[in-house]
Amino acid sequence: MRIAHVITRMIVGGAQENTLFTCEDLVHEHGDEVLLITGPALGPEGDLLTQGRGEQVPVSYVPTLRRAIHPWRDLRSYYAIKNILRDFKPDVVHTHSAKGGILGRMAAHALRVPAIVHTVHGAPFHPYQGRAAHELFRQCEKYATGRCHRLVSVADAMTDLMVDAKVAPREMFTTIYSGMDVEPFLHANEHRDRVRTELGFTNDHVVIGKIARLFHLKGHEYVVAAAARAVKVCPQLRFLFVGDGVLREWLDEIIYEAGLEEHVVFTGLVPPSQIPELVGAMDALVHASLREGLARALPQALIAGKPAISYDIDGAREVVIPGETGFLLEPKSIDPMCEAMIQLASDAELRERMGKEGQRRFTEQFRHQHMTTEIRRVYEELLARR
């Protein structure tokens, strides 16, 4: 097949990892001709395509393709994407992210591409927007959905959200979990002692990690508030924040005000290849985002044998099973998160039991090869119908 993937930017992030694995697998495992169309990787998160991967995937850059709404720049991006697709002549166009998804589907539809697919990594509309912005993004997504043939959700919760918002009928959706390279996470504990020593943790410390951009709605402030209470009961608790972003200085301030300077370590921006060893250094993972399709950090931690504490948002409940693989909490709640931290810090057997169950349940399900095979099956089905 000739397959074009369109995404707004290839920063270091979950949707981008998903897209790159798909492109690489289509080339290496299935022998397809693939073209990745993207804008510049602007932002503090870093450029995924400079991390030593993706050399076998041709990339076509659209300099005007940006995340922020800008009518003139967006119009130029639409025509640029359309021209690239016209030259490439794809059998399939597969889009990702809000801006790339809307412009890519519009361009592919105008060119009558035989199969047009969009992956819902996370809805562009959410409860924390103003009413006007929420409705605008919902209507844009509904309009773009009318210009594609299938929607792929990274979690069942994404399908429910989009159907409830009347973006598309349920029969348009297929759930395919976002794949990853599971092997490094299965061997994550091999690096545990070295990495903990480098980070300043001792054997007595119980380390709870959070992997997320330091950005709005990622929930770091709730983790800090819960941690401030938990360390009074369990002073052996330590917290590892993996990632960087615009809220770093603000987080430093609230950590200082909470008296947690000795309990929190920031790694800053790290390449994806370093994530497994950092997970290996943890004893549990906390996920406090208020919106996210299905955070890759959750299955990554579970595959590495680490239990998870998560707010019950979007697809989290599909991997964080209360009492079995972790704790599922009301969004924005502080006391329940504190209690979960204390339980895990006080009970090594509980941590081991939950971690092993997560590893048993989700290792095979989240292999990226499995994801790509399922995605390619969608392409085949659509092309056969067309």
Image (spheres, helix red, strand yellow):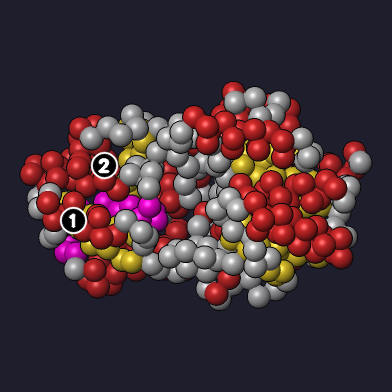
- Tell me the magenta residue range: 201-215
Mark 1 surroundings within 10 Å by alpha-carbon count, few (fewer than 14), some (14 through 19), many (20 or more): few
* Amino acid type shown at disc 1: Glu
User: Which residue bears the numbered disc 1?
Assistant: 253
Q: Earlier in the sequence, mark 1 or mark 2?
A: 2
Q: What quarter of the picture does the N terminus occupy?
A: bottom right
Q: In which quarter of the image is residue 148?
A: top right
Query: Which residue is more in the foreground, 113 or 226?
Result: 113
- Alpha carbon distance from label 1 to label 2: 14 Å
* Residue sitting at x 60%, y 53%: 70
* Amino acid type shown at disc 2: Tyr
SS type, badge 2: helix
Q: Is residue 149 above or below residue 19?
A: above
The rendered magenta stretch, by its main secondary structure, is classed as loop
* Residue sitting at x 72%, y 69%: 60
User: Which residue bears the numbered disc 2?
Assistant: 222
